[in-house]
Image (cartoon, rainbow, N blue to C red):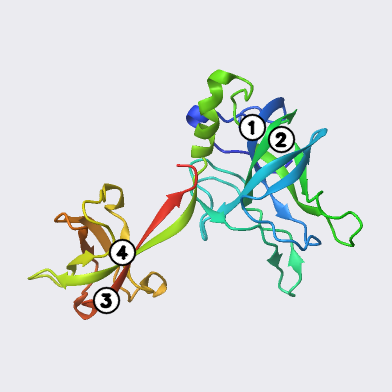
Amino acid sequence: TGGGSTSDNGAGGSAAGRTRGVIGTFDRCVASTSRISFFKENIESGCKIHVTLGYVTVLAQVFFFSKEQGEAGGPGTPVGAFNFSADYCHLPELQATASGDGEEKESSPDVFVVMIFDKPVTCPTNTAYIASRLDLDVHTKQCRLAFFGTIVDVPAHDPFDPLAKGLAHEYLKGIRVYKTKRKTGKLERIEKGSETTCIASGFFKKDSDISKFVGLNVYPTGGEDGGSKSPVGTLVSSFGKSGKVKVEFDSSIAHLLNAELELCFKKYTWA
């Protein structure tokens, strides 16, 4: 029946990881997912699609995500298992992967989907599902079955309980899906007596609160993918009140005066 959750979700509650296979009522879930290669339309995150699970078909808004490249999803997490303690990359759309001979195959086992249903559903909490574009013209010669998978986690709260309304968002907050964001700035000057500490401008506006950005990495533009030879900086503090910041690099930046810099950070979807 597919992989299971490896941890509970705190305040939001995680049911499937503890009580696999019981009948539950829920209005959102995490599920494994594989694209059906015969389906030729785009399947974008945020779209609504018909989902059939148990004995019902209901519209759901879907958001796709995958494990970070090179990551295993957390210590002891098997391939295809979901882990609330791991970070996951937002996927703009669900794509099929290509095999060695160029043919399309099902998506990676480490691709998941959050499904938020238009109304609560009642079914086994580890059930299989299939998503379809039932709105497509039935008379056209195209596959309407888009993707399929197995539920791996559902919230513990009752979606019909008015007192549990806030727990629905708490459940989503526990799913650490992010988009990589970048701010651009300029290396304005190098501190006297140092070859690795600089003052940078352009990242923030005047009087901005930069506390949540302290400790994040700063790179010369294009340097994040430039290999070990590119100096890597760390934003250490603000500098004055004009939005300037102090950045410390791990090697000499004497050749980077006035160079463009990038501040890279993660923006979580449901934080």
Pointer 2 residue: 126
C-alpha gap between disc 4 and disc 1: 40 Å
Q: Position of residue 260 (x, y in %)?
A: 30, 73
Could you give the CA–CA distance between mark 1 and mark 3, rounded to whole angstroms? 51 Å
Measured in 3D between alpha carbons, the distance from the residue under mark 2 to the one under mark 3, in whole angstroms, is 53 Å
Left or right: 216 as drawn, with respect to 56: left
Q: Nearer the viewer, residue 210 or 109?
A: 210
Q: Position of residue 51 (x, y in %)?
A: 75, 42
Label 3, residues with CA under 10 Å away: few <14, some 14-19, many ≥20: some
Residue 238, compared with residue 128, is above or below; it is below
Q: Secondary structure at mark 4?
A: strand
Which picture quadrant has residue 122? top right
Q: Nearer the viewer, mark 1 or mark 3?
A: 3
User: How far, Cα to Cα, is label 2 from label 1?
Assistant: 7 Å
Question: Could you tell which of marks 2 and 3 lies nearer the N-terminus?
Answer: 2
47 or 81: nearer the viewer: 47
The reply to whether callout 2 and callout 1 are in contact (CB within 8 Å) is: yes
Assign the N terminus to one quadrant of the image: top right
Q: Which residue is mark 1?
A: 16
Q: Residue at x 69, y 39 (%)?
A: 151
Q: Secondary structure at mark 3?
A: loop
Mark earlier in primary sequence (1, 3): 1
Foreground disc of the pair 2, 4:
4
What residue sits right under mark 4 in the picture?
218
